[in-house]
Image (tube, helix red, strand yellow):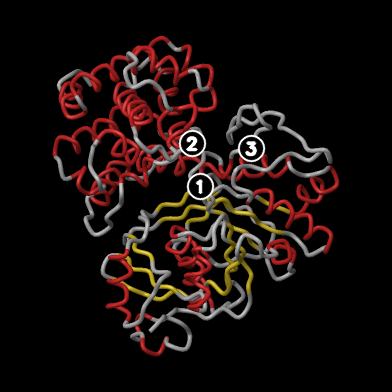
Amino acid sequence: MRLSRATLSRVAPAARPLAEPRVTGVVHLGIGAFHRAHQAVYTERAMAATGDDRWGICGASQRSTDVVDRLRPQDCLYGVRAGDEVRVVGSVREVLAPGDDLAARLAAPETAVVTLTITEKGYRRDPLPGGPPTAAGRLVAGPSTASGQLVAGPSTMIGRLVAGLRARAAADAGPLTVVSCDNLPDNGATLAGLVAELCEPRLLQWVEENVRFPATMVDRIVPATTQADLDDMAVRLGVTDLGAVATEPFTQWVIEDSFAGDRPAWDRAGALLVDDVRPYERMKLRLLNGGHSAIAYLSGAAHVSEAVGDPAFTGFLRRLMDDDLSPTLDGLDGFDLAGYKESLLTRFANPGLRHRVAQIAADGSQKLPQRLLDPARDRLAGGHEPRWIALVVAGWMRHVTTARELDDPLADRLRGDETASAAVTVKRLLAIEEIFGADLREHRVFRELVTDCLERLDADGAPAALRAFAAGPS
């Protein structure tokens, strides 16, 4: 029997939704597992804390109907397992398929907030045939259509967002806050810049006067749901739940306190509203996400918990965090950074998550710049050699050169000759400016570090290379 409002009585009272929204006030773009385990949970808790039932969520699917097919038959109910706790979440009221009228929902006057989880590659823009793609953070004048409007990115969600803003402006439906929840530096400003490039002058003026794009930092490990997770949820709930997600107990959301109008009381649900998100953003991107990338490209494990089960690999992660990443963090006065790093290792070691390394390894060209290359620049600027970062970058280069199947939007440009020397491979990949910029390609110290690391990996394999590095100087 499938989970739905009609079968909710079969679920234990303690596991039923905390709130029942009566109005849709939030539209979410990219309603995947992360949103359902993170922002949707905060929104439900905010409604429960205040009794304000105006914040139901309309989720829009990005590319496929898979989530729609899972949630619609369940009246958009789904379960979240966080450690040993299981609860059905009821904050999602409706889901839209890619062809549905998203603009109408964005133009509705009761909609006050839009949130996005469209992944890093959703902030890239499609090139014209033969032209190079551009990445968020390195925006250039983009290609135009006959109407003079810019072409939207590989994910059309930003284009659909702009169409909704155009409809909202025409309907005079009031101000709107658009909240990026993706792992990008200055994600609010990045999104605002992409939206601006797609707006005609009149719409841009309306956006500047009526829309805010606060920056955020989100943190919760949410692996892709497996059949084992669905089977476990069916036992725990007493009904079949095809929309279930499994996550960890830890959750964090830091939001820039810059809203155009009303919002859910996310602060009552545990979110932290601050004037400047950037210190928290850098900490999470570099330590948690950077640590994940290291595991993806150097551990050889199938799941994260298996990688950190090896004391030698855990020692490597500590050196990466302590020697190369932590020195690049500032603005965290009073924050227990040492405790945070220890908590990361504990979270990584959680065997209940079954976080697949292949999921983390995907789209590396979009993830490396903010996770590891920006801190490498910081270390180089300070006169230091980012040895541990260079080893991870070399691991990524080995991965993209040898992987049988490469899940990356730049896959065709990343693949190369497996028999090429390390120096040739490093030179070829450093030349991809969307990833490394012009600076790292020309930086002799960085180039030599990565080449040396790749030579070690090719000759001895990752375990031996890690041991050799661990035996070297800090």
The residue beneath circle 3 is 126
**Residue at the location (15% across, 35% down)?**
312
Helix, strand or loop under label 2: helix
Instruction: Say which quadrant the N terminus sits in.
Output: bottom left
Quadrant in the rendering for residue 8: bottom left
N-terminal label among 2 and 3: 3
Q: Nearer the viewer, mark 2 or mark 3?
A: 3
Q: Amino acid at mark 3?
A: Asp
Question: In this rendering, is residue 58 above or below 470?
Answer: below
Check disc 2 and report the residue beneath it: 366
Q: What is the three-letter code of the residue carrying label 1?
A: Thr
Q: Secondary structure at mark 3?
A: loop
Mark drawn on residue 173:
none
Percent x, y of residue 457: 24, 23
Q: Position of residue 164 (x, y in %)?
A: 73, 57
Relative side of 57 to 271, left or right: right
- Residue found 45% across the figure and 37% down from its top: 367
Q: Are marks 3 and 1 in contact (CB under 8 Å)?
A: no
| Alpha carbon separation for disc pair 3 and 1 | 15 Å
Sequence-first disc among 3 and 1: 1
Neighbour tally class for label 1: few under 14, some 14-19, many 20 plus, Cα within 10 Å: some
